[in-house]
Image: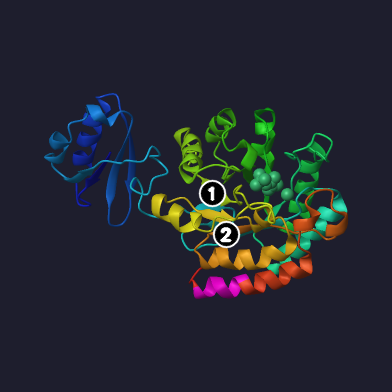
Amino acid sequence: MVIIMDPRASDEDVMKVKHIVESEGLQTNLSKGNTYLIIGIIGDTSIIDSKKIQVLTGVDRVMKVQEPFKKANRLFKPEDTIVHIGESAVGGGRIGIIAGPCSVESEEQIIEVARRVKEAGANFLRGGAFKPRTSPYSFQGLELEGLKLLKIAKREIGIPIVTELMSTDYIDTFVEEIDVIQIGARNMQNFDLLKQVGKTNKPILLKRGLSATIEEWLMSAEYIMAGGNENVILCERGIRTFETITRNTLDLQAIPVIKKLSHLPIIVDPSHAGGSAYLVEPMAKAAIMAGADGLMIEVHNDPENALSDGQQSITPDQFDVLMTKVKAIAEIENKEI
Ligand code: PEP
Ligand code: MN
């Protein structure tokens, strides 16, 4: 349920409504914009008599929220959420480009890729240190050594870093050292992990699960937000369908659907979606055209010898071309990279 207040309602009017709702044992969520003031209610709202609320001074109208996600719901907060990370921002007309190798492999590799993607206009460096691999015999990542190398690249090149957290064991280290914490597709419903990152104040990049519905994905965002961390960026990375020629099927419709249902920013990862380098540029362009707030792209300086996901990694030269085109599309869309 949301209570839409008259934007001219006094602080006392708002406090009174909040007090009445909270005295029923429910939680409230206040959202204030230039033209609106909304009190969102979280909990079992069936105990509230909306007619009694409707007549209170300062109340414009009361609306039921059908969806199970509340804090992530656009009805709770009509304005786009903008997640700020240093000088960059994602959402509300600001596009964030995250680029870098699938895995951090060596100091030379990560510094070289960081330099090239930054020169091309990327705002963030990605690189997996802890890798969720389907096979236990595949390269598992350099782990803590990988984090150290990411930090060196950040310092040398001056670019914020994004990397995946797989277990709550390392959460304190990530909070201290990483700019954006990625929750991978395979962990989208690791509720313990979601609850723990919800207690931090770090921006969280939440990837869509391999077979997660949009509602399940938003419920995972809700877990993070329920803990108090509202800096959530969603990432569409393709879903599993009957198609086998592509690694996954990129659900571009998720972009406008998320925009309708939620105020959270959504970016697209065309690398894991298609699983092939040739699909990255067309799908990156389509994503920005469809309204995405950013991209996550795998870039490797030597894709043929990459320790993971070489087949879907583009080279720095290809990334230069992609960025030129994406910048042109962003301009048409009136957005800033
Ligand atoms: C990744 O981005 O490194 C990754 C493993 O992606 P996903 O979780 O989407 O499979
Ligand atoms: Mn990868």
Q: Quadrant of the N terminus?
A: top left
Judged from this view, the residue extending furthest toward the front is 242
Read off the residue under disc 2.
294
- Estimate the x, y position of residue 80 in percent, counting from the top left: 42, 55
Q: Residue at x 52, y 45 (%)?
A: 232
Residue 111 appears in the picture as rendered: yes
Q: Amino acid at mark 2?
A: Gly
Type of the residue with mark 1: Ile
Q: Any magenta on residue 220? A: no
In the current view of this chain or complex, which residue is farthest to the left? 55
In this view, 132 is above or below 258 = above
- The answer to whether marks 2 and 1 mark residues whose Cβ atoms lie closer than 8 Å is yes
Q: Is residue 337 visible?
A: no
* Residues rendered magenta in the picture: 326-332
Q: How many marks?
A: 2
Q: Nearer the viewer, residue 185 or 32?
A: 185
Mark 2 to mark 1: distance in Å? 10 Å
Q: Residue at x 25, y 34 (%)?
A: 18
